[in-house]
Image: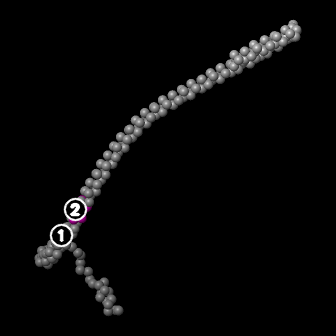
Amino acid sequence: MKNVTDPFLSLGYWPSAGSFGFNTDILATNPINLSVVLGVLIFFGKGVLSDLLDNRKQRILKTIRNSEELRGGALEQLEKARARLLKVEMEADQFRVNGYSEIEREKLNLINSTSKTLEQLENYKNETIHFEQQRAINQVRQQVFQQALQGALGTLNSCLNNEVHLRTVSTNIGMFGMMKEITD
């Protein structure tokens, strides 16, 4: 194992060559070596570089085409959305107009219905008042008739004999029967 690691250990003992930098002496830089290296790089790197540039160009063109297609699709969707928005706004306006007219119609129906109900309640109230008046009048009549009858009977009983008494009672019964028929 010592044989394998020796060359690596000896690297640490090399003396430094000096500083690194550009040599401006043309004769010392060996222009031939540089031109050969540059020629090889240009010859082999030209194909690789042109392939890289072509691939990059194709990807850019493909991205632009995709972007244009997406833009076209987005514009179509935007136009469809605008058309739908316009349609919805028109429908909303129509609903609003219909809603206002429907509200007015319902308001008039409610007013008419309430007016009819109030009129019916007024009629019912008047009928009830008239009925109660008639009932009170009938009660007063009955009381007056009863008092008059009792007074007449008292007078008759004290003034009349049996025969006049029977004739007067039968006449009064006939009159009461006729009165009853009139009041009914």
Quarter of the picture holding the N terminus: bottom left
User: Which residue bears the numbered disc 1?
Assistant: 50
Horizontal and vertical percent for residue 182? Answer: 69, 16
Q: Residue at x 84, y 8 (%)?
A: 164
Is residue 67 left or right of 173 when viewed as pictured?
Answer: left
User: Which segment is the magenta one?
Assistant: 58-64
Residue type for callout 2: Leu
User: Which residue bears the numbered disc 2?
Assistant: 61
Is residue 91 left or right of 160 when viewed as pictured?
Answer: left
Gap in angstroms between the C-alphas marked 2 and 1: 16 Å
Marks 2 and 1: which is nearer the front? 2
**Label 1's element?**
helix
Q: Is residue 31 magenta?
A: no
| Camera-side residue of 160 and 89 | 160
Picture quadrant where residue 6 is located = bottom left
Q: Residue at x 74, y 18 (%)?
A: 139
**Label 2's element?**
helix
Quarter of the picture holding the C terminus: top right
